[in-house]
């Protein structure tokens, strides 16, 4: 079981999905997995295929419902939500995990 699951959300391709996924995949902390959750746009499966990550398409949804459904698939102990137009620093997950106070 991974320590952290990253849920990457998207509605449409606004041009930054590659960068968002790469920022998630290039973490210094390696005990994580990724779910690519999309709000009703099955055409975005090409990104999931390209980066070999699970794809969740929730048609006719909204952001909150999309995240809640994605959370049902989470395997990690911790969750990090990343929007398709956001980037993670390379040490984001490591910093998050180390800040837990244990």
Image (cartoon, rainbow, N blue to C red):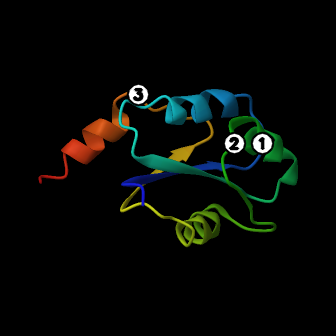
Crowding around mark 3 (Cα neighbors within 10 Å: few <14, some 14 to 19, many 20+) is: few
Q: Which residue is mark 2?
A: 52
Say left or right for 73 vs 31: right
Asked whether the residues under the numbered discs 2 and 1 touch, taking CB atoms below 8 Å apart as contact, a structural biologist would say yes
Q: Which residue is mark 1?
A: 49
Residue drawn 40% across and 39% down?
Answer: 30
**In the structure shown, which secondary structural element does the residue marked by tag 1 occupy?**
helix
Q: Which mark is residue 35?
A: none
Asked whether the residues under the numbered discs 3 and 2 touch, taking CB atoms below 8 Å apart as contact, a structural biologist would say no
Quarter-of-image position of residue 15: top right
- Of 66 and 98, which appears nearest the observer? 98
Residue drawn 81% across and 59% down?
Answer: 40
Residue drawn 61% across and 71% down?
Answer: 69
The residue positioned farthest toward the front in the image shown: 1
Q: Quadrant of the N terminus?
A: bottom left
Crowding around mark 1 (Cα neighbors within 10 Å: few <14, some 14 to 19, many 20+) is: few
Q: Which residue is mark 3?
A: 89
Q: Earlier in the sequence, mark 3 or mark 2?
A: 2
């Amino acid at each position: 079981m991974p320590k952290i699951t990253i849920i990457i959300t998207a509605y449409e391709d606004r041009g930054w999905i590659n960068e968002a996924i790469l920022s998630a995949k290039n973490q210094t902390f390696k005990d994580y997995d990724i779910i690519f959750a999309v709000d009703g746009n099955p055409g975005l499966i090409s990104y999931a295929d390209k980066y070999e990550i699970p794809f969740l398409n929730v048609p006719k949804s909204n952001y909150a419902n999309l995240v809640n459904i994605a959370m049902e698939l989470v395997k990690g102990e911790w969750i990090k939500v990343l929007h398709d137009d956001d980037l993670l620093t390379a040490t984001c997950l490591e910093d998050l995990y180390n800040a837990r106070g244990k």
